[in-house]
Amino acid sequence: MDREAYRNCCSLVKIPRQSYEQFWSSHFVDYIDNELSYSKFFKKYLLPNHPCMFSRRFTQDWKCRKQWVTGEGKPNFQKLLQEFDEIPVPVANCNAKEYNANPKQVMPFKEFIHYWKEYIQNGHSSPKGCLYLKDWHMSRDFPEHNIYTTPVFFSSDWLNEYWDTLEVDDYRFVYMGPKGSWTPFHADVFRSYSWSANICGRKKWLLYPPGQEEFLRDTHGNLPYDVTSAELQDRGLFPQYEEACQPLEIIQEAGEIIFVPSGWHHQVYNLEDTISINHNWLNGCNVDIMWLFLQNELSSVQKEIDEWKNTMDSWHQHCQVIMKACSGIDYAEFASFLKIISDNRMAFLNACSSGDPSNYPRQISEMLITLGPYHAAFDLQRVAHVLECLLCNEDFKRLDHSSMSLQPETLLQQIRDTIQSTRGQHLLYQE
């Protein structure tokens, strides 16, 4: 049903305009099946932090959709085994709970495929539980495969740009799981965006807008493992559950790509035997959300070990160590992250002025050239804003900055100088 048809139905049963507009905005997402400019995606979805779905036409030319899927739309186990066979892969057990996630093990790819075949033959059940291959860095481990192309809408990807530079990690994953496999309730790393493309199979997504997760906490402040569990109806355990909105429920078909905005908590089910490509990513539109997340993470750590504050000279540094162990990053690395992103854009804008914007690693060069100097200038302004916040932060001031390759004050001034010197050519992003 499109929006106009929905409005007409509401009119027939005399639902007030305000009510149907509110219901539409909270229970439906835009379905993109035609040409969409990056500029429109930027303004309509990235900046407002609003979800959407892209049709299968955006993935129809991907090699993985042609080679990893049978004519019946099922996983092509034979082809997959030819490519990956003995490769070790991370596999989670969806029937077991470890904290608020599923425990993982590493096994040879062929062992997982053997399990998956038996699981299907046994009516989608197994004494081993429901196993789910997830968070596999396939793209990093096999860059020569080129099984898909990141859509331009998701190409401004600071997260992977940074970790590609360090050559130690990335946030590009392959998931493979049988019907019934699922991912418990969570929000993505650093409160990043995510996009997920179904290569084959179908998924059901339950999404909650930012802030709604606060109504789902138990009396100890913990988020639920499973938002569909009957125990959430227990007011003694989850006193605010009835105040939460109903989740946005989305069925994702084979070939479709879902865009999940920053801070949207979600739970995901595989309705069929499913393979998907997933990226976590962030950029100038949501870097301030990442910065807020890091402050909240540090605050939580500080509360946990507050009793030792007056007995440890290095208490503040110790909080950073714990924070990095829990979340994967601390304030010093966040500053390094901002530096690499801004260095690339300052060099790009200066190269544009000199007439040679292509002297970069290929992937970064293609992305910056495609998005253009306006976007690079926008990125720099967003980095500058977060750097100003960082420099005013009392916890950051207490840290030892001597190990940083460039002092944040110096970096901030360089960004301002670059923006000023190129302002005539590269104004704030406004395509």
Image (cartoon, rainbow, N blue to C red):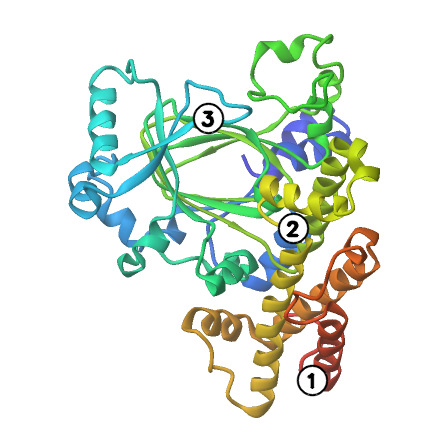
Quadrant where the image shows the N terminus: top right
Q: Earlier in the sequence, mark 1 or mark 2?
A: 2
Q: Looking at the picture, how far across and down is residue 342, in whole percent?
A: 63, 70
Q: Which residue is mark 2?
A: 330
Q: Is residue 379 found left or right of 95 in the rendered image?
A: right
At x 61% / y 81%, what residue is drawn?
A: 349
Q: Amino acid at mark 3?
A: Asn
Q: Looking at the picture, how far across and down is residue 409, in whole percent?
A: 77, 71
Quadrant housing residue 88: top left
- Within 10 Å of disc 2 (Cα), the crowding (few <14, some 14-19, many 20+) is many
Q: Looking at the picture, how far across and down is residue 262, in whole percent?
A: 63, 45
**Considering depth in this image, is 24 or 431 the residue closer to the camera?**
431
Q: Earlier in the sequence, mark 2 or mark 3?
A: 3
Q: Amino acid at mark 2?
A: Asp
Pick out the residue farthest to the bottom.
Answer: 354
Mark 3: secondary structure: loop
Q: Which mark is residue 422?
A: 1
Q: Which residue is mark 3?
A: 102
- Within 10 Å of disc 3 (Cα), the crowding (few <14, some 14-19, many 20+) is some
